[in-house]
Amino acid sequence: MQTVGGKYFDTFNTISAWCEQSLLQQAMDQCAFYNALLSKTVEGSDVWRINHAGGEPVPVSQHTLTILKTAAEISEASQGAFNIAVGPVINLWRFTSGEAKVPDGESIKTLISHADCSKIKLQGDAVTVPAGMEIDLGGIAKGYITDRIADFLRERGVFRAILNFGGTVVTLGSKPDGTPWIVGLQHPAGEHGKKCWAAVPCSDESVVTSGVYERGFYVNGVRYHHIVDPRTGWPVQNGVDCVTVCSKNSLLADGLTTALFVLGPEQGLNLAERFHVHAVYLERDGKISYTTGFNFVILENTP
Ligand code: ADP
Ligand code: MG
């Protein structure tokens, strides 16, 4: 098996398969294209142009439209728990800057009051976002990109592969011996990539996880992390340590994981059932809850 790695979207990503290394490299190189299209910080990207259009319609690529349609669907179904308009609030927290800090409550309040993503309009290939609103596809773009890279490999005859894009894992086919891939779920307290609390067997499926341990910081023992409750603008503090969604569709799984994180287990598992995906929550107190029939294994070292 060959593996290539690449740093994109603020994480280290790997693609592994039984094929030429150069083909895997080509697959990884696709990330540069998607980053140039979807990053909010790359000048001239679709998202950058949307955010700098001052309320005017902006023609965008089909890729961006597809993501925005799914984002709108998840937003509506989650009653706004998933909200790509939280961008300015996320900027305020500066999670990815290395200098994250707790912003003042008034600024949060003001910015979140403008974050009504139901006002985003899609007409033909044009997107209109009201002036003063900004979008951030950080909660869903990786799902779309991994779907596209998986397709890129399938179109070139690669039917057994595994992609790991920092919490978004996509499996193609099964292992060569015909048994499913086993995707480990990161232990919230363990060293990154070293300790798992559960294992999910899967073939041709995505396993997407959002966790408090991913990006964030502590102040006086309180964890401030990168998933924000759109009702308040503050990082979600609902006792959820991590949630994983398993689906054939990585785009859907990624968006839903973020939504489920915000909603918490009770409403989140209902939403997962409505979208016919499997999901599992691990809470800080060790409680585990999951959708009916989800086939996964809880490992011994669970908190
Ligand atoms: P990652 O895989 O990077 O951990 P997640 O899928 O967990 O990403 O989503 C977190 C990212 O989504 C944040 O960095 C931010 O860009 C964006 N985000 C945060 N809160 C929300 C929300 N309530 N709705 C939609 N997107 C959000
Ligand atoms: Mg997500």
Image: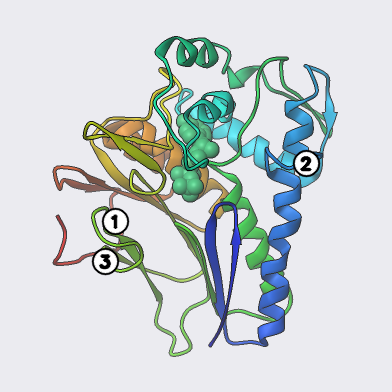
Residue type, numbered disc 2:
Ser
Mark 3: which secondary structure?
loop
Mark 2 Cα-neighbour bin, 10 Å: few <14, some 14–19, many ≥20? some
Earlier along the polypeptide chain: callout 3 or callout 2?
A: 2
Q: For the point 29% across and 56% down, which residue is it? A: 293
Q: Quadrant of residue 146?
A: bottom right
The percent position of residue 209, horizontal first and vertical second, equals 40, 52
Q: For the point 77% across and 25% down, which residue is it? A: 52
Earlier along the polypeptide chain: callout 1 or callout 2?
A: 2
Picture disc at residue 293: 1
Q: Nearer the viewer, residue 62 or 302?
A: 302
State yes or no: Cβ of the residue under disc 1 lies below 8 Å from any atom of ligand 2: no
State yes or no: Cβ of the residue under disc 3 lies below 8 Å from any atom of ligand 1: no
Camera-near label (1 vs 2) is: 2
Residue type, numbered disc 3:
Lys
The percent position of residue 13, horizontal first and vertical second, equals 54, 65
Q: Is residue 113 above or below residue 254?
A: above
Q: Mark 1 and mark 3: span between their CA atoms?
A: 25 Å
The percent position of residue 271, horizontal first and vertical second, equals 40, 36
Q: Is residue 58 above or below residue 19?
A: above
**Residue wearing tag 2:** 45
Q: Quadrant of residue 117?
A: top right
Mark 1 Cα-neighbour bin, 10 Å: few <14, some 14–19, many ≥20? few
Earlier along the polypeptide chain: callout 1 or callout 3?
A: 3
Q: Mark 3 and mark 2: span between their CA atoms?
A: 37 Å
Q: Quadrant of residue 151?
A: bottom right
